[in-house]
Every structure is written in C-alpha cells, then in structure tokens.
Image (tube, grey):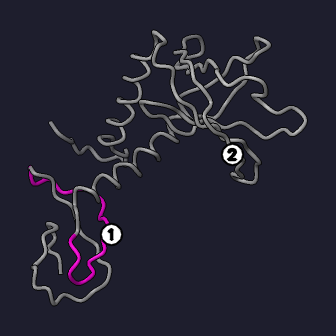
Amino acid sequence: MPHRNGTGTGSGSEQAGRGMIRLVSSNGAQTEEAMEVSTEAGELVDFGKAREQKIEEKRRKTERVFFKNLLAVYCVTANDAMAAVDLVDVSEDGLAFQVRFDAKNPWPKDFNELPIRLYFSADTYLEVGVRIQNSRQTIENGARLVRYGCTIDKEWSSYEAYLQFVRFLKLYAEHNHRDVGDLRVYHI
C-alpha cells in the first residue's frame, strides 16, 4: 500500500486495485485533495503526469467560473453589430466559443475571421482576431449550441496582452484556493 506521502513499499505483492494517495511537493507540502491513481501490480505511477492532469482539470473548472462570472465576450459581426458569445476555452494559440444554434439565421455565416472582444469591465476590452478552424453542434443543459474552435491571429498588436491573460489564467488555476472561511495562510 502507498504511504501517506505518496511513496509505495515496492513489494510487488500489493493487491491490485485503485487507491487514494496524497501528493507531496518537493518542499514537503501536501495537496489538500487526494488523487485516485491506478496501482495495478507491476504498473509504475507517474506522479508528474497525474499532477499535470489534476492541474488541467482545475484550470478548466477555474476558466469556466472566470468566463461565466467575470468576463463578458462579444464578437463584432459583419453588419457592425455586437453579438454575445460564450467563451469555452483559451490557449496561447487559440480559443473556443459557442453560440445558440439558430437554423433560420446561422452565425457566423459568411466569414471565417472575426474580432473577439474580451470585456474586463463595462467599458474596457481587449480585442483579438480569430480565424475559425472548425465547428460542431452540441447540446448543453438542454440548449442546442454551435461550438467554434479558432486560432488567434498573432499578428495583432493585442496578442501579447492576450498571451499574458492566458498565462495568468493557467497560473491562477494552479495556485488559487477556495475560500472556506478559514484564516490559513498559503505560501508566505
């Protein structure tokens, strides 16, 4: 059986199955959540890969909360109107957004390059150019949606700011803590 600090006894005669372990960083700090890792007999567990997967899950969850509650995202359409879009994912090379499906008025219809505005307040935004690479229909919470996968135009002058925003989200997801009312200090 694995010890609490995530190291195994290495006996080779351990019972196959799934176990809960605590990951310990190089400075000895334990994570707050246990991670389920396969402990099949003879199988090696890559703790680095398991940690990366956990961080990626946390990043996606953090992004969804951030996108839904703190960031308004709009696209400037062909007729110089603004259309609200739901941001789904961001990366250094691209982003994904979704809109409600409308068979009578498909959107965006006749163009593959769009300016996307990320509003951080009611009157300030960061605008980036995107190129639609793919689209697919999906159903989420009973609503029919079209999800678009896009690449970011790195030639826009705003790309560097967008890049720092993506990096901030990644680091924030890794280091944020849920407020549960305690006065515990993390990483002084």
Percent across and percent down for residue 166 are 41, 29
The correct choice, above or below, for 18 with respect to 72 in the image is: below
> Where is 170 relative to 152, above or below?
below
- Residue range in magenta is 27-44
Rendered location of residue 83, percent (x, y): 73, 23
Element type at mark 1: strand
Judge left or right: residue 184 versus residue 105. left
Residue at 67 percent across and 30 percent down: it is 85
Residue 69 horizontal/vertical position (percent):
55, 34
Q: Is residue 30 magenta?
A: yes
Q: Amino acid at mark 1?
A: Glu
**Which is nearer the N-term, disc 1 or disc 2?**
1
Position of 132 with respect to 38 (left or right) is: right
The majority secondary structure of the magenta stretch comes to: loop
Residue 10, percent from left and from top: 10, 79
The quadrant where residue 119 appears: top right
User: Where is mark 1, residue-wise?
Assistant: 36
Residue 101's place in the image compared with 5, above or below, is above
Q: Residue at x 72, y 47 (%)?
A: 137
Check disc 1: other Cα within 10 Å, few if <14, some if 14-19, many if 20+.
Answer: few
Which one is in front, 76 or 181?
76
Q: Secondary structure at mark 2?
A: strand
Residue labelled with disc 2: 136
Gap in angstroms between the C-alphas marked 1 and 2: 32 Å
